[in-house]
Amino acid sequence: QVQLVESGGGLVHPGGSLRLSCAASGFTLDYYAIGWFRQAPGKEREGVSCININDGTTYYADSVKGRFTISRDNAKNTVYLQVNSLKPEDTSVYYCAAVMGAFGSAAHALETRDYDYWGQGTQVTVSS
């Protein structure tokens, strides 16, 4: 059974950092794309980042470029999202998602509707 479990969220001050984890079970990530999404209260879920596991290609939303970094540890079947220089507007529940294959454009890689499997989310709160 496919399962994704996020962890690593928490409460941080503006400018702080966290490393979010997405641990996959029930399948290996080799032929999947893994995306990170976030949803704040009253807002639509938005794509943050994506990685094609097969070749390491990454995609980022413009709002997080230079601050967030996605990576994978194939041995641990885990994808990470390092979130730095956090701003209050980054406050959201962060979700990881998976879909078989690989994306060739950010438009699809960051599109919620293009993913098949979702985790339960981890809360990131940025506040002074």
Image: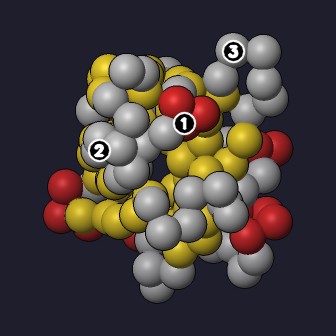
Q: Amino acid at mark 1?
A: Asp
Q: Residues within 10 Å of mark 2 (few under 14, many from 20)?
A: many
For the point 18% across and 64% down, which residue is it?
75
Q: Residues within 10 Å of mark 3 (few under 14, many from 20)?
A: few
Q: Nearer the viewer, residue 55 or 69?
A: 69
Residue 86 image position (x, y, % from top left): 42, 43
> Is residue 24 visible to the viewer in this orientation of the structure?
no
Mark sitting earlier along the chain (2/3): 2
Residue 78 image position (x, y, % from top left): 29, 52
* Image disc number at residue 41: 3
Q: Mark 2 and mark 3: span between their CA atoms? A: 21 Å
Q: Nearer the viewer, residue 45 or 53?
A: 45
Kindly state the secondary structure of the residue where label 3 is placed: loop
Q: Amino acid at mark 3?
A: Pro
Residue 2 image position (x, y, % from top left): 47, 37
In screen coordinates, is 105 left or right of 56? right
Q: Residues within 10 Å of mark 1 (few under 14, many from 20)?
A: many
Residue on which the image places disc 1: 90
Quarter-wise, where is residue 76 in the image?
A: bottom left
Q: Mark 2 and mark 1: span between their CA atoms? A: 11 Å
Q: Looking at the image, what colour scheme do you see?
A: secondary structure
For the point 28% across and 55% down, which residue is it?
77
